[in-house]
Every structure is written in structure tokens, then in C-alpha cells.
Image (cartoon, rainbow, N blue to C red):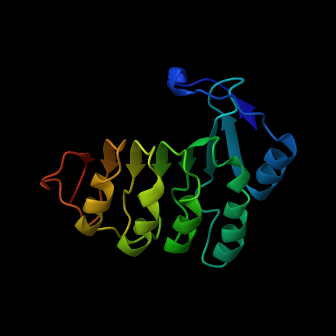
Amino acid sequence: FAAGTSDTNTSELTDSYPLDEILLQELTTKGFQIRELVNGAGVLDVAISEGLVTLENRQEWEANLKLLGPLKNQILWLDLGGNTVTDNHLQLVSELTSIKKLVLDNTAITDVGSKHLKDLSHLESINLYNTEVSEAILPLLQEMPQLKTVYVWGTGISDNTNTELELIGGS
């Protein structure tokens, strides 16, 4: 676990959350990388290294993602990119309702699993680079009130798509 600062807008942080050091240690042991975004605020950037979730251990990672539940109000950034993250994993991610930035590049997610993301009402940016999503998810994304930027290189989403979202990349 490492503390640090970032460009997170601290004026939006109305609450300070105590950090459960025992839970953070357990998560670190499981392979999560955890960083406090604003020193002393208890809001977190959580990531896992590329290649950590595989076909062989993806069910184990469903259990690991459930461990993030007590931190659902504290996790603002989540990076699961470069892993065999599936639609089932997205159901667990959807419970982390304070996420502002979600990185899912180079994962196995599809349009079917993306429906789980509808409850992420604070989401501002999502990276879907090189996933199996298509333009079918755009109505869902457009309903997300805070979402501004969607990274779509290597997906079934065209960069000529008519949307108010900032689509970066596209087929």
C-alpha cells in the first residue's frame, strides 16, 4: 500500500474514510496494488498487474474481487486491464459504486457483461481498448450521468459514431 497525491479533485471529496489496514494488507497479499489518491482522505486507486487473472484462476479472482466490497465508497480508480477479466467479474465491479475511472483494456468483457456497469453513476472515464464490446453498449454508456471519455480502440465501436461521449480511438 502506498500513499500519494494525484489530480483527483479534492473539493468533491466530502467524506474522509478510515483505512482498514488489515483489509488492505490482505488485498495486497492477494495481488492488488493499492494507492491512496489523496493523502489522508482514504480514497483509493486499486489495480492488479497484467496477466494476474488467467483462465485457470478467474474463479479465484471472483472471490478476490468480492473482498473489495467494504471499500466500495473508497475506490475511485480501478484498473483490471491486461487480465482475463470476464463478464462475471463486471458484476462484482458494479458494486463499487464510487468508481470514477475504470480500466478494462485487453480483457474478455463483452456487451453482455457491460450491462452490469449501469450502476456506476460516478464513472467519468472507461478504457475498453481491445475488448469484445460493440456499439450496442453505447446507449448504456450514454445514460451514465458523469461519463465523459470512453477509450474504444480495437473494439466494435466506430470512431464515426454519433454520440456526445468523447470516443477515443475506434475501428
* Res. 123 visible in picture: yes
Up the image or down, 126 lies above or below 109; here it is above
Hey, which quadrant is residue 158 in on the image?
A: bottom left
Hey, which quadrant is residue 133 in on the image?
A: bottom left
Q: Position of residue 51 (x, y in %)?
A: 60, 62
Q: Residue at x 55, y 50 (%)?
A: 97
| Residue that protrudes farthest toward the right in the picture | 22
Q: How many marks?
A: 0
Q: Residue at x 72, y 72 (%)?
A: 60
Q: Position of residue 154 (x, y in %)?
A: 30, 61
Hey, which quadrant is residue 44 in on the image?
A: top right
Question: In the figure, is residue 64 to the left or right of 8?
Answer: right
Q: Position of residue 148 (x, y in %)?
A: 31, 41
Up the image or down, 5 lies above or below 18; here it is above
Q: Residue at x 70, y 32 (%)?
A: 42
| Residue that protrudes farthest toward the top in the picture | 11
| Residue that protrudes farthest toward the front in the picture | 14
Question: In the figure, is residue 167 to the left or right of 60?
Answer: left
